[in-house]
Amino acid sequence: MATGQCLCGAVRYEVRGPLRDVLVCHCEECRRWHGHFSASTAVLKEYLVLIEQRGLRWIQSPRSDAQAWRGFCGECGSSLFWDPPGRQTVSIAAGTLDGPTGLRSVSHWFVSQAGDYYEIPDDGLPRHEHSGEAEP
Ligand SMILES: [Zn+2]
Ligand SMILES: [Zn+2]
């Protein structure tokens, strides 16, 4: 069972089902929200169990076509969750998981929106423009 938390511990969670491999998203929304490109796993919503949610706040993403909700810690500012309505999964910022995660990054998304201040790693992973079903 995977576990994770925000920086301060005011949001802690357990994952009671299999986690998806990690998608790396370079879209502008992810970069602004996370401060850099995002790396996200995902799990069926019923498998995400909040152990501590004292700090948890949700905002509806102001730019996303998906009208997704973004969950963050109001006490320390960590960004944690991406919850698109109408989908069965919730995305989890991979950096909030406790290690070792056993996960691996498998693809890059929205590469045309990558910031001009970094190079997308030459890691051999597939690069995609639109996310479709796999929206990180
Ligand atoms: Zn926190
Ligand atoms: Zn994105």
Image (tube, rainbow, N blue to C red):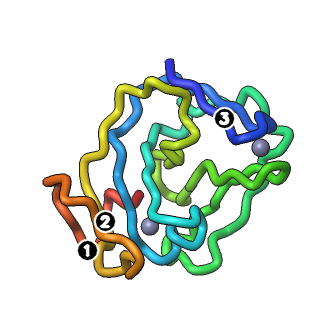
Q: CA distance from mark 2 to mark 1?
A: 6 Å
Image quadrant for the C terminus? bottom left
Sequence-first disc among 2 and 1? 2
Say few, some or many: other residues with alpha carbon within 10 Å of mark 1 (under 14 / 14 to 19 / 20 or more). Answer: some
Residue 11 drawn at (x, y percent): 75, 38
Say few, some or many: other residues with alpha carbon within 10 Å of mark 3 (under 14 / 14 to 19 / 20 or more). Answer: many
Q: CA distance from mark 3 to mark 2?
A: 25 Å
What is the secondary structure assignment of the residue under circle 3? strand
In the picture provided, is 3 more to the left or to the right than 130? right
Residue drawn 57% across the image and 62% down it = 34
Residue 113 drawn at (x, y percent): 37, 80
Can you tell which quarter of the image residue 100 is in? top left
Decide: marks 2, 1 in contact (CB < 8 A)?
A: yes
Mark drawn on residue 129: 1
Residue 71 drawn at (x, y percent): 67, 54
Residue drawn 77% across the image and 34% down it = 9
Does mark 3 have its CB less than 8 Å from ligand 1?
Answer: yes
Does mark 2 have its CB less than 8 Å from ligand 2?
Answer: yes
Q: Is residue 106 above or below residue 32?
A: above
What is the secondary structure assignment of the residue under circle 2? strand
Residue drawn 16% across the image and 58% down it = 126
| Residue holding disc 3 | 5
| Residue holding disc 2 | 109
Residue type for callout 2: Trp
What is the secondary structure assignment of the residue under circle 1? loop
Can you tell which quarter of the image residue 104 is in? top left
In the picture provided, is 61 more to the left or to the right than 26? right
Residue type for callout 3: Gln
Say few, some or many: other residues with alpha carbon within 10 Å of mark 2 (under 14 / 14 to 19 / 20 or more). Answer: many
